[in-house]
Amino acid sequence: MRTAEPAALRSSGGGPDRATFLELFFDLVYVFALTRISARAFEDLVLEGGQTGWTAVTGGGKTLLLLLALWAVWQGTAWTTSRYDPHHLWLQVIVITALISAMVMGVAIPRAFSHSGLMFAAAYVVAQVSRPAILVLVLHKQQYRRLKLRMLITFCATGVLWLAGALLPGNARVVLWTTALLLEYLAARFGWPMPGLGRSTVSRWDIHGEHLAERYQQIFLVALGETILLAGLAFTRSPTSPGMVVAFAVALATSVLLWRIYVQRAGQILGEAVTRAAHPATVGRSAADTHLVMVVGVVATAIGYELVIEHPAGHNELPWLAVILGGPAVFLAGRARFEYEVFGRVSPSRLVGIAALLLPVPLLVRLAPLVAAILAAVVLTAVAVADARRAWGRPPEEAATPF
């Protein structure tokens, strides 16, 4: 363990650095946190009488807000360990702080808009403020410290909104938290601008592309693992019936298909695409947004698993179909963008698959949830087969990023 200043940005020419055990430990917390996200959504849709109409939209929006906050903590930590040596003591302190904060956020998620709001907000603020604060102290080169100082000021300002929102009830909390998250996202998008301190050009950031690519692959696997976990838990906590057995089998098949579509082939060579790009950080930032979309789709799909396994022969409602079919559709939309980032094109099968998932929704409202789940599995199978046919008999396709 090194305690010297992590001043030198990591060299992209020094060979690939794998994620550290501490980073993988950090990811394990997100397995728990994502299950809390799913549990909250499941309660809204089923356990508390279900939600319909506008209530379902607002409930889903609140859950999405919490998921975006979790993503912000994970992404900020992943970018930090991809820019600086994660074996340094102070970088490990940053990761451990984020790990503890994410765990506290996960515990608070189910009641974050009631009595656990302050717990969630405080943990989020600690994670976001401590990271640039530590780097401001340990980085000696002015050009590196200036960026972290701008980030620190931004997170301190938005932290006031997070903590103030936690002290307010209902809609006021949602408004302040949404405003804070939007300000943070815009600040990151435009290089953390600050009067008197300037702003950064993201394309000039030095990152270890293969390390960052591996981190995104790993968080996708975490989300995919959550689908397996939820399907297994839903199947074991209720008496089995033939419909539940079929629903469980469909859920497992769908998880395998999501993995297959992701890795064939863009998911395998994301690191190559990032390192080959003229501006690796630009590809990395784009991949961040893309993986967020895919993770949201996978988490929604996992929630759909629970609904289908526990109510295979029930009656569909639009909020249920929004996760059973909308989840895979959102995943395919993110996967289409991912393909463009790596290869500079989008396969028609992605767009056809999205249409095949969404167009039958008016007909499926009258049918059982299991029918919708089977349709999702069939559509994903067709997309996976189209990918396999394109690659059959050809040499492995190389990255050709347009960035």
Image (spheres, grey):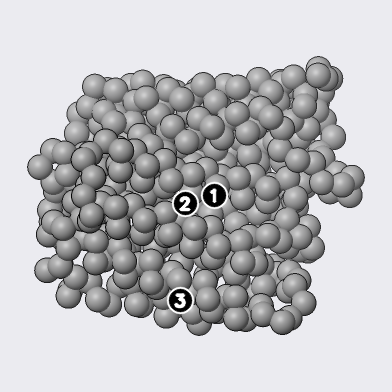
Q: Mark 1 or mark 3, which has the lower sequence index?
A: 1
Whichever of labels 2 and 3 marks the residue nearer the N terminus, that label is: 2
Q: CA distance from mark 1 to mark 3?
A: 22 Å
Q: Nearer the viewer, residue 171 or 256?
A: 256
Residue 130 position, x and y percent, is 58, 23
Can residue 57 be seen from the camera position used here?
no
Binning the other alpha carbons within 10 Å of mark 1 as few (below 14), some (14 to 19) or many (20 upward) gives many
Q: Quadrant of the C terminus?
A: bottom right
- The quadrant in which the N terminus is found is top right
What's the CA distance linking mark 2 and mark 3?
Answer: 21 Å
* Residue 358 placement: quadrant: bottom left
**What type is the residue that disc 3 sits on?**
Ala
Q: Residue at x 46, y 76 (%)?
A: 382
Q: Is residue 362 above or below residue 113?
A: below
Residue 383 horizontal/vertical position (percent): 48, 74
Q: Secondary structure at mark 3?
A: helix
Q: Does dot 1 land on a helix, a strand or a loop?
A: helix
Identify residue for label 3: 382
* Residue type at tag 1: Phe
Residue in front for this viewpoint, 156 or 329: 329
Q: Tell which tag, 1 or 3, sits nearer the viewer.
A: 3
What's the mark number on residue 220? Answer: 1
Q: Which residue is mark 2?
A: 295
Which class describes the residues within 10 Å of circle 3: few (<14), some (14-19), or many (20+)? some
